Structure formats: C-alpha cells, structure tokens
Image (cartoon, grey):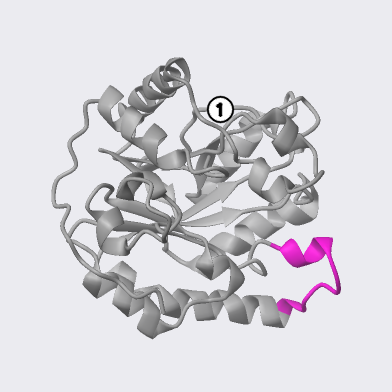
Amino acid sequence: MITIGLSTWTRHPHLIHDEDRPVRFDEYAGTFPLVELDNPFYGVPTVKAVTNWTTQAPDGFKYILKAHQSMTRHDDGHGEPITDDVRWQTFAQFRRAVAPLVKAEKLATILFQFPPYFTRSVEHIQYLRDVRLRMGDLPVAVEFRDPSWYAEGVWSDVQDYLKSLQITYVIADEPFDGNQGVPFMPIMTTPTTAYFRLHGQNKKGWLSREGSWQVERTNYHYTMAEIQRLARSVQQVAETVDHVYVIFNNNGHGDAAENAEQLRDELGLKFTGLGPTQLDLF
C-alpha cells in the first residue's frame, strides 16, 4: 500500500485555492490520509493533544511524528548537552504520549531526523541501539544527514545494522554534492515499512546557510519528469514492503501539495475514507 502526505497540514494554500490563511485539518484530511508532524520535535505533546489527534482524524488516517530534538541529539551541536537522565526521561514521556495513536492504529512511524553532526561513529552506532531499546516495539525510522553513513565499504553494513534493529531507513531526496547532503538510496530495512522524504533539489538553498536558508532549502517544485522518476522508485519499493509512506517536504514556497497530487495521479492512487473532520492541535 502506498500512502502520500505532507509535512504539517497548515501551510499548503494549494489545498484551499490559494487563500491566505492556515489550512484546517478537515480540509487537509479531505485530500491526504497521512501527515508528518514536526510539533513533537520542539515539545513532547500531551496525552490530551494526541488523544485529540486520534479521535478527530478519519478512520485509516495515519500520523508520522518527529521525535523530540533531545531524542535526536540536536543538543550536541549547540549549548550545553543535556544529561542522559533527562534524555531517557524524554524517551519515556514520548512513549506515553503516543500511546493513544498506537492503540487506535493511527501511528505510521516515529521519525528520528538526525542532524548533520550525527556522524558515523562508534558512539552514534551504539546510540541507534539505544533508540531501539528505549522505544520498545514502536515503529521507528531514521534519517541521516551526514554522508559518512554512505561511505564505500560501509553502507552495506549500515543497512544490515538497521535491519537487525528493525529500524526503517528514510529514503531522502535532497541535494548531494559528495560532502554535504545524502544520496537518494531507495532501499528497505524493514519488511513492513518504507519511508520516502522528498525535500526537493534546491542545491543553493540546501547546501549553504546564507540569508533565509531555513525556508529556501525546501523551496523547490518537482518537474513532471522528476515526479515520474520518483513514481518508478516508489512502485519498485512497494513490491517488497507492506506500506510505503511518501512525505513531500519541498514546501519552502508552498509547492508540496501540488507535487503530492501529481505523484498520486501518476501512481493512479485513489485514497478512500477521506472525510471532513476538524482538529485542534493542542
């Protein structure tokens, strides 16, 4: 099964005829059955908020939640690193928070999007094992941002390691120059799940940190030729796993929704069970 969605639901004016306002959840859920939420990256959600997401979403709707930034060791790159005790407490808090989604079978996976300074080191390799142990049997996906994980003679071992941990590898589409970014590698490390994250190919915005780079890095509109290339990769992967989740994150200037609809149509997908509901985020 192939399911397509976007990163967040509020910032996609294409879905509401380019009106200048946030998209409501019911408007989003009337088009796509999957969403990736980055709110948990900044603060672990309350059980009440997650219960709200669970009860008000249509049947069959799925969520991908970003792990909290302390869980992905973003603190290593700035300020004073937090203690292990605090980090493990956040893991436990996160697990409690997502329980309503798990019970309702609306959790697709938890995304551990590691920073570029999460390099391939003995410490970080061990940390991936810690992630699996701390998350128990919850579905986990990891996205690398440093090319050291893909070094010649190493990448096959990384794949095997992720398979042994039952962690889904995130197939990222982003600029890659050999030193920055990561290559597009449509491989699977779990038999149940594959996960594409499509950031676009804005090389200038992605590989530099000048100006408003945080917006410009995902300012990209996929051409139909690129959509067709992605469709072939998605179809190929879908032949070997139970679920393929595709998230468009190329939304610096609001292009993600249109590209997602183009991929949906290129794949001939018809999403069922979409319905008008309304959801308060907190």
Q: Residue 101's x, y, as percent?
A: 32, 69
Q: Which residue is mark 1?
A: 185
Q: Is 21 placed left or right of 171 in the picture?
A: left
Spot occupied by residue 251 in the image (x, y as percentages of width and height):
52, 44
* Residue at the image position 82 percent from the left and 43 percent from the top: 210
Identify whether 46 is placed above or below 212. below
Determine whether 139 is above or below 5 in the image. Answer: below
Residue stretch rendered in magenta on the structure: 73-84
Residue 77: say if magenta: yes
Residue 240 visible in the displayed image: no
Question: Looking at this view, is 112 or 267 the one in front?
Answer: 267
Furthest residue toward front: 20
The image quadrant of residue 146 is: top right
In terms of depth relative to the viewer, which is nearer, 169 or 272?
Answer: 272
What residue is shown at x 52% (from left), y 46% (from top)? 164
Q: Residue at x 74, y 23 (%)?
A: 152
Q: Is residue 282 visible?
A: yes
| Residue 87 horizontal side relative to residue 82, left or right | left
266 part of magenta stretch: no
Which quadrant of the rendered structure holds the C terminus? bottom left
Disc 1: CA contacts within 10 A as few (<14), some (14-19) or many (>=20): some
Q: Amino acid at mark 1?
A: Met
Which residue is pictured at 40% across the width and 49% down the height? 13
For the N terminus, the quadrant is: top left
Q: Residue placed farthest to the top in the image?
A: 225
Residue 214 versus residue 66: which sits nearer the camera? 214
